[in-house]
Amino acid sequence: MGSDLEKWTEIYGPIIHQLPLNKLCLVETHDSGTFRMKSPIVAPWATTQHATIEEQLQGGVRVLDLRLGCDGPQTYLLVHGMWRTVTSLNDALCSGWYPSVTTIAELKMAIGEGLQDASKKTGLWTVGAVIAATPFRKVPQIPQLLAWFLPGQDWTERVNIIQADFVMEIDLVPNAIAQCVLNAMEDHFFKESLNTRLPRLVESFTQRATT
């Protein structure tokens, strides 16, 4: 994971900074705190991210899914369903956050709320990609997943947050960056400035995609 992903919102800020939040395309880690489960027995099946929260942010993730369970009076741990991690909410909120970068933390005390009708989209809408992995099966490579999230496809009309398991292994962040730039191009306010910046942006993105 390169420094360009770590600082992508800063690099592309001059182009995307005027976009409203629901026009940005952002990657979210599903059950962000499961990189270190408390029980070694359930860890192989309850883990949905191998990267720490700091590594997730360095890899370009800008939305965190923090699910909370009580661990004493006014003390909260990150959990996955009924299974606890060793990471406290306080530790999670102090894990490599950047003062100059806005990151969304989605805090949940309950699980299982379904998506509403995206045709009435007024806020932020999420689609999730659950990827099964166990000690006997590594994170699978799914070409169809990246293909489905190609920039400029119809999914962008219904969703602006991509939530996935094992985000660092499936490399969705470059797709999200490209979609942010496309959204800015479609906004008339940016067209004039993009005409001068676009060739450089396309060259930069192409270099990253081929390395």
Image (cartoon, rainbow, N blue to C red):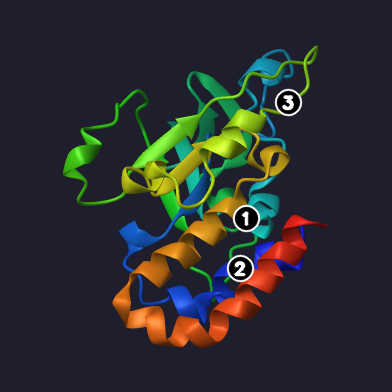
Q: CA distance from mark 2 to mark 3?
A: 25 Å
Identify the residue shown where x is 55% and y is 60%. 177
Q: Which mark is residue 55?
A: none
Give the camera-side residue of 177 and 99: 177
Q: Which badge, 2 or 3, comes first in the chain's sequence?
A: 2
Q: Residue at x 38, y 37 (%)?
A: 108
Q: Which residue is mark 1?
A: 174
Quadrant that contains the C terminus: bottom right
Q: Position of residue 119 (x, y in %)?
A: 20, 39
Cα gap from disc 3 to disc 1, whole angstroms:
19 Å
Q: Is residue 72 visible?
A: no
Of helix, strand and loop, which one carries label 3? loop
C-alpha span from label 2 to label 1: 9 Å
The amino acid at mark 2 is: Trp
- Please state the horizontal and vertical placement of residue 199, each as a whole percent of the image: 61, 78
Which residue position holds label 3? 139
**42 left or right of 123?**
right
Res. 152 in view: yes
Identified by mark 1, the residue type is Pro
Q: Residue at 41% of width from left, 71% of height from top?
A: 185
Instruction: State the mark number for residue 8.
Output: 2
> Disc 3 residue type?
Val
Q: Secondary structure at mark 2?
A: helix
Q: Residues within 10 Å of mark 1 (few under 14, many from 20)?
A: many
Q: Position of residue 102 (x, y in %)?
A: 47, 67
